[in-house]
Amino acid sequence: MDKIISMENVTAHLKDGMTLMIGGFLANGTPDELIDCLIKNNVKDLTIICNDTGFPDRGIGRLVVNKQVKKVITSHIGTNPETGRQMNEGELEVLLVPQGTLIERIRSAGAGLGGFLTPTGIGTVVEEGKEKIVIDGKTYLLELPIKADMALIKGSRVDKKGNVWYNKSTRNFNPIMATAADVVIVEADEIVEVDEIEASNVVTPSIFVDYIVGGRG
Amino acid sequence: MDKIISMENVTAHLKDGMTLMIGGFLANGTPDELIDCLIKNNVKDLTIICNDTGFPDRGIGRLVVNKQVKKVITSHIGTNPETGRQMNEGELEVLLVPQGTLIERIRSAGAGLGGFLTPTGIGTVVEEGKEKIVIDGKTYLLELPIKADMALIKGSRVDKKGNVWYNKSTRNFNPIMATAADVVIVEADEIVEVDEIEASNVVTPSIFVDYIVGGRG
Amino acid sequence: MDPRERIARRVAKELKNGDVVNLGIGMPTMVANFISEDIEVILQSENGFIGMGPIAEKDQIDKDLVNAGGVHVTSKKGAAFFDSAMSFAIIRGGHVDVTVLGALQVDENGNLANWMIPGKLVPGMGGAMDLVVGAKKVIVSMEHTAKGKAKILKSCNLPLTAKGEVDLIITEMGVIEVTDGGLLLKEIAPNISLEDIINSTEAKLIISPILKPMEY
Amino acid sequence: MDPRERIARRVAKELKNGDVVNLGIGMPTMVANFISEDIEVILQSENGFIGMGPIAEKDQIDKDLVNAGGVHVTSKKGAAFFDSAMSFAIIRGGHVDVTVLGALQVDENGNLANWMIPGKLVPGMGGAMDLVVGAKKVIVSMEHTAKGKAKILKSCNLPLTAKGEVDLIITEMGVIEVTDGGLLLKEIAPNISLEDIINSTEAKLIISPILKPMEY
């Protein structure tokens, strides 16, 4: 069960039209080498689920600039003008979701739930087309789970079994995305021996990780 | 903002008729000294939310044996025959909830959600009185959040600001309960200086903790 | 060989390399002793970890480490601990490949009853309802009858743990798969006749055309 | 003094010892510079931590540490990092005492619009909708008008961020509380007349009988 693969071997898992979750928050904690790999292979028509579309030259934004993205489900596109331009030109479909709702929808899928009730978005355009449920006199939106074919995440330290530890603010969407995709590939800053991450400090247990690629550190 | 208090000072916060969450799983990771304090003060008519009622002489079960509990919301009572006896005699109300649903209901309250949809319990007595919602052809139960007046939790290492780290299987319900009660008291195995727990390894951030009592270690 | 050991040995054969497995309290726990050394199976303990090892010997006891039965156990290299919300996200979210549980009753529709006998025994469901709904494969491992009474029924009459979720039933008498058409007897223990097993089973058994001897 | 600094200074006075505070991008971020040294305020950053410190100087930059604006910041002693699900559990669950945000428009009913101008600017809502719904107290901090046009309206006409969640509006002209009866002007800046502020506000302002000078 060796999970460590080369970046060349990642290629075999990439397909045009895939739905991808990609970790990171404004290019912090984003798996940059895996994005390089997507660019190098020019994988097309991607649906990407991510917190934001980064910047034109950093993070997930590079895939937008390179026109590999068909649809993006995200909470924020303001730092990447190219996302807005492609959206306005009708080249790219953008679905904006409140950040807390987006991460919770991903968690919901990973946790086997059918959805959840949130007060966020009530009285706004976010409620359009959604069921409202009143609990104890308070109105909530029913939000549904969202999953992906593949999650590309970034880990600061990854042991050889696939247990992951995240340093500081690089954690963000990564551990939750690892629970909600059919295939999970983690890009490691550092690959360490099993048990070098204390078992009580593991954030993503190894069972969620299918493949590990070694990052530049 | 010194959160460290003596066990005597805990007494002032205890009231007959309170709803308490108490952490632990079969007496592992249970705040034993806080339970001693509840017993010593003979706080009565408690509603207790907990994974299980432990054993007659260990964990939360001691409160049952001492007849301080009016109602218990829990997933398992099988290891404490006294809970079953009091239930059968009509002395104690027992509400049994599937373990995954119980912890998720607590999380839901702490996370400001109005509830969630779970497949657990469909076709069983658990579904009685609950709304069913069909999503993509699959039936789910709508389960509602549950909160408490106070959560009594156990931490292995607690820094002086209230950041908590849990060792091994003692974590269980503790960190989630810390998010869902008006007042949170953590019993520490060890109280350490601020920053002795690496910031990326903190499990319960200090903002959830109101008071810290020093355990026997 | 003890019938319970035979059952545990046969259940162990169902596990594949890399499987994430949750073993219920009691006989299912014994399965861990018989997993082939050629494969690596990751045991999940619903109180909050993966990588559970054997029961702790006296000198191995760690006060901060118990299994879901409250018994002191060891952890393996590469273990990971988490809270109960994550534990049940793993269980309910389909990240457990196999769960093995005991049963009071199981029936032709894959219904399972294993958490209470009204007016008599009410331990509570613990994590069983989530496990049976969430695990990819649900194996019931139990003795075929209780005090001579059938436990494999046309229809459970005790309160259910879950509806239609059981995949496989393994007893000391045989191996039975729950199919859309009913209960398919696939293996029979060497010392047991077809008549024996049919008489010990209230539910209708479909006999597989390629019925095999049960191997442990 | 720069009007933006005056606003930030006045907002800082709203914060109490022990408050957990989330400061939005832009002017709200400046508030951190003016918090009294007599109190301890814990800054929450929605990308996943509490205990945010000032912007990192060049030699303090840590590649693994940014704020919710993607800017390298420092962390304070006792900081704690977590994932985005926990971050928004904190936000939506009422564990943030105060959130300070900018606004495009705010109205008499406490409605807030700050995330898009249709056909023009669509940055997305990021975490703003959750923050405004979840925080115990919502403070809008902004310049009173935009290019001479009122931003405090009878009714917002841009898409809302949240309905009826704003508690307090602080501008360079004054401090306005959102009450059930409407917008209550509680403080007025020293250099501003009542006529000035009324003319710069589309919404009806109720003048507090104990109207005070605004202090920074």
Image (cartoon, coloured by chain):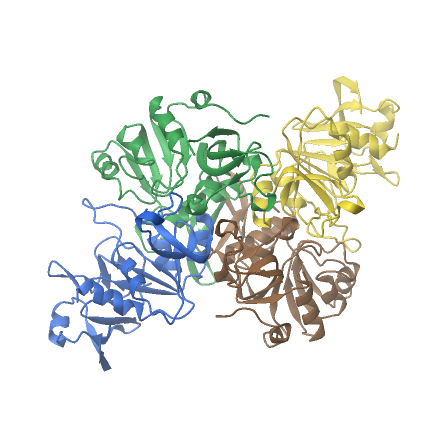
Chain colours: A green, B brown, C yellow, D blue
Expressed as whole percent of the image width and height from the top left, the position of residue D93 reads: 45, 58
Q: Is residue C120 above or below residue C213?
A: below
Q: Which residue does the image show at 26% across and 36% down from the upper left? A: A56
Q: Is residue A40 above or below residue B176?
A: above
Q: Is residue D184 visible?
A: yes
Q: Which residue does the image show at 24% across and 64% down from the upper left? A: D107
Image-based side of D98 in relation to D181, left or right: right
Which image quarter holds the C terminus of chain C? top right
Q: Quadrant of residue B84?
A: bottom right
Q: Residue furthest top?
A: C210
Image-based side of C28 in relation to A106, left or right: right
Of C72 and C16, nearer the camera is: C72
Of A147 and C65, nearer the camera is: C65
The image shows a total of numbered marks equal to 0
Q: Quadrant of residue D10?
A: bottom left
Expressed as whole percent of the image width and height from the top left, the position of residue C4 reads: 83, 35
Expressed as whole percent of the image width and height from the top left, the position of residue A163 reads: 55, 37
Of B138 and B145, nearer the camera is: B145
